[in-house]
Image (cartoon, rainbow, N blue to C red):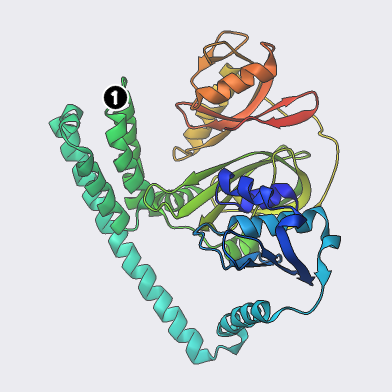
Amino acid sequence: MTEEQIQELSPDASNFKRGKALANTLKWSLLAVKEKVVWGLCKGSGSNPYKTQVDLEEPAYKCSCPSRKFPCKHAIGIMLLHSQNAADFTKKDADVWVQEWLDKRQKSSSKKKDPKEYTDEDLVKKQKAKEKAVAKRQRLMESGIAELKEWLKDTVQLGIAELQTFPASYFEEKGGRLHDAKLPTLGNAVKELYSNLQAKDWQKKSMETLAWLYTIANGFQQIDNLPIALQADVKSVVGVNIKKEEVLEIGDTIVDDWLVLGSKKETSLTDPQLKSKRTWLKGVKTQKYALLLDFSFRNAPFENNFQTANIFNGELAYYPGFPLRATIKHKQAFKGNLDQLSVFSNLTKYLSHYTEVLSENPFVYRYPFMVENIFFDKKGNLYDQDKINIPTQNNKTSYKLLAISGGLPITLFGEWNGNALLPMSTIAGGRIIDVKF
């Protein structure tokens, strides 16, 4: 693994910094390797060294230190050491404590039944259990949607100003009921209503959220009357996601040289242990965008750890619905020149295109933004040569872009949500620069 990939595995920046300080052979009394497993003894504050072991293939980690971070700084340190100079590691059979860990993991893995071992009776039972679970979830969702629509109607009848009289706990409770009904995205939107009501333009933001919720609820209740592609988008918004394995089998595919334009990590509003990561790609030949969406629980590594400006050759399979979200079917390392990318020449043309996208699919929440001739002023405002401007989600990023551009026009990539832009990278001098904070 490269240092960048190891950094992606770290739960936070401070943990990686501490781990980097341990990437020093003087800190370790033992460094050993067998195939894809590395282990070592790291000097700590106590009399006994910490026993650290890492399976680089998965990756998987174990350390005797008391840290609750996963991987801990010792695991980060030993991975960095191995990436810097594998020759520092002694090739040998696994020590007893390492072999015990490997055996335990092997035993746990062997308990999982091989799909080939299922009998016809097993498969029938499994299918019935699946159908029962799907039917139960469908009933919960239908009930939650019906309750949401009634609440929305009552809210509009009373007047949205009435919402300002309610405390944050009211929206937490309403949003929580939607989570219980297996409608997490809608639940989060209701919870965020409280902060919208505190904004200066609270009328506009609140009505947009209420209208969006009503559109989704209506779409779900009338889903059989919608085009097939739009049905898939509605299901995705409310929380019914197709499995990756099925997408790989039936999804439309594109082979291209894929350029990584940027990524964004977020923590779930309802579960701080659940994290997500969005990675935006663009095909150099086809000019098609693709969004890779990964999830991580309890600091487990994300599946995709691409760095901004990476280029790889691969085949992507797209999820049903509006062609944005995809998953990687095959990939191989690729290094090439950054060819000319198609971009919009000004904000007016981009916003007109975005309007057309919404007319095709009103449920698009985040959409790729790539426009040239963008300027930034000292206040962090973003505008084009025609003085058309749009707000950004992060002023710190705008200041960084101002420093990069030096006041000259730049080509900018980011995520547009209809209200504000999240800048992610800029293209200048034939190279891509990550601009996220």
Residue 405 visible in rendering: yes
Q: Nearer the viewer, residue 279 or 348?
A: 279
- Identify the residue shown where x is 48% and y is 91%: 121
Q: Position of residue 53 (x, y in %)?
A: 66, 68
Looking at this view, name the residue that lies furthest to the top: 386
Which residue occupies the foreground of this view, 410 or 45?
Answer: 45
Q: Quadrant of residue 102?
A: bottom right
Q: Residue furthest left?
A: 158
User: Badge 1 is on which residue?
Assistant: 202
Q: Quadrant of the N terminus?
A: bottom right
Q: Position of residue 85 (x, y in %)?
A: 83, 56
Above or below, 214 relative to 46: above
The residue depicted at 33 percent of the width and 34 percent of the height is 209
Side of 14 relative to 141 (left or right): right
| Viewer-proximal residue among 321 and 256 | 256
Circle 1 SS class: helix
Q: Position of residue 352 (x, y in %)?
A: 54, 23
- Check disc 1 and give the amino acid type: Trp
Q: Is residue 341 visible?
A: no
Where is the C terminus found, in terms of image quarters? Answer: top right
Residue found at x 19% / y 43%? 170
Point 48% across, 58% down: residue: 241
Vertical side of 94 occupied by 356: above or below: above
